[in-house]
Image: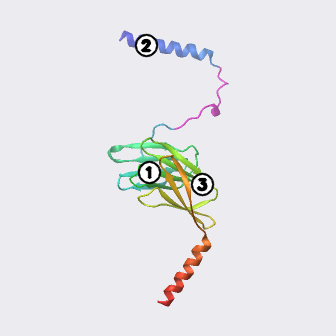
Amino acid sequence: MIAAKRLMQKAVNRRHHHQQHVQRDNLKPEDLDLRIAVHYGIPSTASLLAFDPIQGLLAVGTLDGRIKVIGGDGIEGLLISPKKSPFKNIEFFQNQGFLVTITNENDIQVWNLESRCLACSLQWESNITAFSVIGGSYLMFIGDECGTMYVVKYDNEGPKLLQLPYCLPASSLKDACKSFKEHCKND
């Protein structure tokens, strides 16, 4: 009991001594980069959900650039995007241990769930309006505001995102629909 009392006294004395030497006006809010390190439950700014039925994981994207990953047995993880921007899309590479997010700033981010960190990101040049992961692969379809569809691959070895040389402009889709309609009329 006496040892605990002495330890508390030392801590109080050190704190008091330290406060005498600190100037109060030197520390500004921008000097600190405060972030949430621990969070329990569903975030209040939740906006998107993704589910991996094989691993039993639920990802919750928020309006302030956080991703809460919830699994069985009360396991939770918090991923914090370097860009504090809302997410447009969020999807798992099913049973692969990776999560893909698209921010409102059109940044494609791939998260490594095992290490709980951002594996890589790619800033897209145009406004992404459609997104889908091709099941069982590391391939993604990305559609933009011009109606063009692209194929992007996540290279786990890099790790990096690669835009593949496959591009489907809106005009070719329009022509394909016309020929399909004509084919259906002839049957």
Q: Residue furthest bottom?
A: 186
Secondary structure beneath label 2: helix
Q: Is residue 8 left or right of residue 171?
A: left
Question: Pointers 3 and 1 in contact (CB under 8 A)?
Answer: no
Q: Residue at x 35, y 52 (%)?
A: 56
Q: Which residues are magenta?
A: 23-35
Which of the two residues, 134 or 27, is positioned nearer the viewer here?
A: 134
Q: Residue furthest right?
A: 25
Secondary structure, magenta segment, majority class: loop
Question: Pointers 3 and 2 in contact (CB under 8 A)?
Answer: no
Q: How far apart in space, not on screen, are marks 3 and 2 (Cα)?
A: 53 Å
**Sequence-earlier tag: 1 or 2:** 2
Per the rendering, the mark at residue 8 is none
**Sequence-earlier tag: 3 or 1:** 1
Residue 43 visible in the snapshot: no
**Which dot, 3 or 1, sits closer to the camera?**
3
Q: Is residue 47 left or right of residue 123?
A: left
| Colouring of the image | rainbow
The amino acid at mark 2 is: Leu
Per the rendering, the mark at residue 59 is 1
Neighbours of disc 2 within 10 Å: few (<14), some (14-19), many (20+)? few
Secondary structure beneath label 1: strand
The amino acid at mark 3 is: Asn
Q: Which residue is mark 3?
A: 106
Whether 25 is among the magenta residues is yes
The amino acid at mark 1 is: Ala
Q: Which residue is mark 2?
A: 7
* Quadrant of residue 126 within the rendered picture: bottom right
Which of the two residues, 168 or 16, is positioned nearer the viewer here?
A: 168
Residue 27 visible in the snapshot: yes
Neighbours of disc 3 within 10 Å: few (<14), some (14-19), many (20+)? many
Neighbours of disc 1 within 10 Å: few (<14), some (14-19), many (20+)? many
